[in-house]
Amino acid sequence: MRLKIVQAGDPVLRQATRQLTPTEISGPDIQRLIQDMRETMYDAPGVGLAAPQVGVPIQLAVLEDRPESSRDLTPEQLAERERRPIPFQVLINPTIVSQSQDSVDFFEGCLSVAGFAAVVRRARSVRIEHLDENAASRVLEAHGWHARILQHEIDHLRGTLYVDRMNSRTLTSLENFSRHWKSLPTAEILTKVGS
């Protein structure tokens, strides 16, 4: 079932979320929510979705970056973003246990801040501990675009939106992003906007 994605300004996006117990994870309500969130993410379309974005204040997020999501990008753009397909993943009660000192600036959008994007600085690599959809403990190491998605979704579980971390001079409508910025390297964009 496709769920409604709440937009910035809804209090659920700014509140702390609660952790799930293994019993809750294996129960039919959470298992159904995982499937509904996956369907909603595909339909949006997006590469990640956190439970608060569908109005549920729990520590649950799904992500997947399918090959068709980046089919319009050039090899140079894929390399700049360090972007490769990511299989479907479920993160429950995730914690970033370490992250690289080096960071990367790139545009991010959000299904809960519809119609806009801005440059956000994120750690290039992260190590995450979490539970999966079967309540099994997992450790995930991610780099590049995958690390960016993970950080973005975990921020949602902490009541943080990308607009809290963005370079405010780069905020743009998606229409203007496509028109003016999409094909430029991020370093050039940052020079042009004076940051």
Image (cartoon, grey):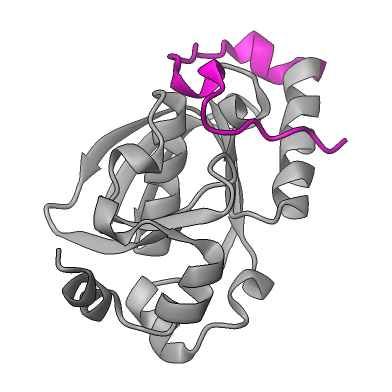
- Residue 79's x, y, as percent? 37, 81
Q: Quadrant of the C terminus?
A: bottom left
Question: Which of 141 and 60 lies nearest the eye of the viewer?
Answer: 60
Q: Nearer the viewer, residue 142 or 103?
A: 103
Quarter of the N terminus within the rendering: top right
- The image position of residue 73, as x and y in percent, is 53, 83
Residue 21 counted in the magenta span: yes
Whether residue 105 is situated above or below residue 79 in the rendered picture? above
Residue 32 horizontal/vertical position (percent): 81, 27
The image quarter containing residue 143 is bottom left
The residue at 41%/62% (across/down) is 145
* In magenta stretch: residue 109: no
Q: Is residue 3 above or below residue 66?
A: above
Check the image and name the residue furthest to the right. 1
Residue depicted at 59% across the width and 54% down the height: 47
The magenta span reads 1-28
**Image quarter of residue 77:** bottom left
Q: Residue at x 64, y 66 (%)?
A: 66
Instruction: Examine the image and state in which quarter residue 128 appears.
Output: top left
Left or right for 28, reference 8: right
Q: Is residue 167 visible?
A: no
- Rendered location of residue 74, percent (x, y): 49, 89
Residue 173 position (above or below residue 18): below
* Main SS category, magenta section: loop
